[in-house]
Image (cartoon, helix red, strand yellow):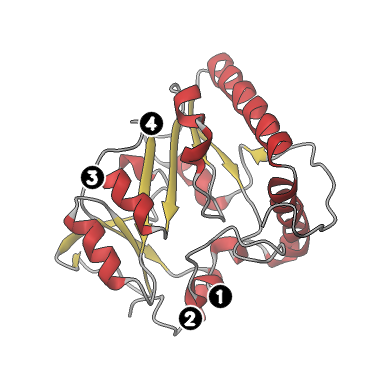
Amino acid sequence: IMGKLNLPYKEPTRLMFKSGNPKTDKNQSVEGLENIVVLHLNLAPADLSGYNVCPMASQGCKSACLHTAGNPVFQAQKDKGRINRARFYMQDRDKFMTQLTRELVNFVKWCDKNKKIGVVRLNTTSDISWENYNLFEKFPMLQFYDYTKIQKRALKFARGEYPPNYHLTYSLNEDNYDRAVEVLNEGGNIAVVFRKDLPDTFMGKKVVNGDLHDLRYLDPKNVVVGLKAKGKAKTDYSGFVMN
């Protein structure tokens, strides 16, 4: 798609933020995890920006996207920033990656200075194959993690084919049940959104509470990560949210 569309955007002064995301800020209030700071990148999900940054997003996943979680008062402003960053990524990839790398370098320095453990979530509201950019190798002192709906990526992670500082959790939706089973069979983890209470087991695996914090790389291996429906997901009946 790159270069095909010419959509207006302004070069953002910042791509990533250390706070302001209720999901990634959660660990700050968990005993033992207060020292971990998550730097996150939010792009406009699916094709909201005119470009699709979530190639495997299902209808249910699009309508229930976490992009809408949080205070609705700020949604329009958030949309603007995220659309802008997604267009920048799509239309000037080299410049985007230069800025992203610079921000990661600064984050490492900030963590050293403040005696914090640096963690990075690049796909907070996207599903881009960041492994293609050599970032994990460049920043071995940082822990990276994401959720993905791209099964090929989840299987590579389950088979140990990614650098040790990258962790992936496969996301179940209404149309990828069989692919999720394959990921579990390879030893990977899958995330499942439940409407009300989390069951003890699901798909034959132990369910862990994924809402206590968002640091998925701390999860045990080969489990189901249970998440409760939030935002628009509460009213989703596509099959994306499990009853």
Please report the residue visible at 46 percent of the width from the left and 39 percent of the height from the top: 131
Is residue 176 rendered to the left or right of residue 83? left
User: At numbered mark 4, what does the secondary structure look like: helix, strand or loop?
Assistant: loop
Is residue 53 rendered to the left or right of residue 240? right
Label number found at residue 63: 1
> Which quadrant of the view contains residue 54?
bottom right
Q: Mark 2 points at which residue?
A: 236
- The earlier-in-sequence mark between 2 and 1 is 1
- Marks 2 and 4, how far apart in space? 34 Å
Marks 3/4 in contact by CB < 8 Å: the verdict is: no
Looking at the image, is 214 positioned above or below residue 173?
Answer: above
Q: Name the residue under label 4.
A: 165
The answer, for residue 187, to whether it is visible in the render is yes
Name the mark nearer the viewer: 3 or 4. 4
Please report the residue visible at 51 percent of the width from the left and 42 percent of the height from the top: 130
How many neighbours does mark 3 have within 10 angstroms: few (below 14), some (14-19), or many (20 or more)? Answer: few
How many neighbours does mark 4 have within 10 angstroms: few (below 14), some (14-19), or many (20 or more)? Answer: some
Please report the residue visible at 83 percent of the width from the left and 51 percent of the height from the top: 9
Residue type at numbered disc 2: Asp
Q: Mark 3 points at which residue?
A: 220
Residue 18 position, x and y percent, is 61, 37
- Marks 3 and 4, how far apart in space? 15 Å
- Marks 2 and 1, how far apart in space? 8 Å
Looking at the image, is 183 positioned above or below residue 237?
Answer: above
Marks 2/1 in contact by CB < 8 Å: the verdict is: yes
- Marks 2 and 3, how far apart in space? 29 Å
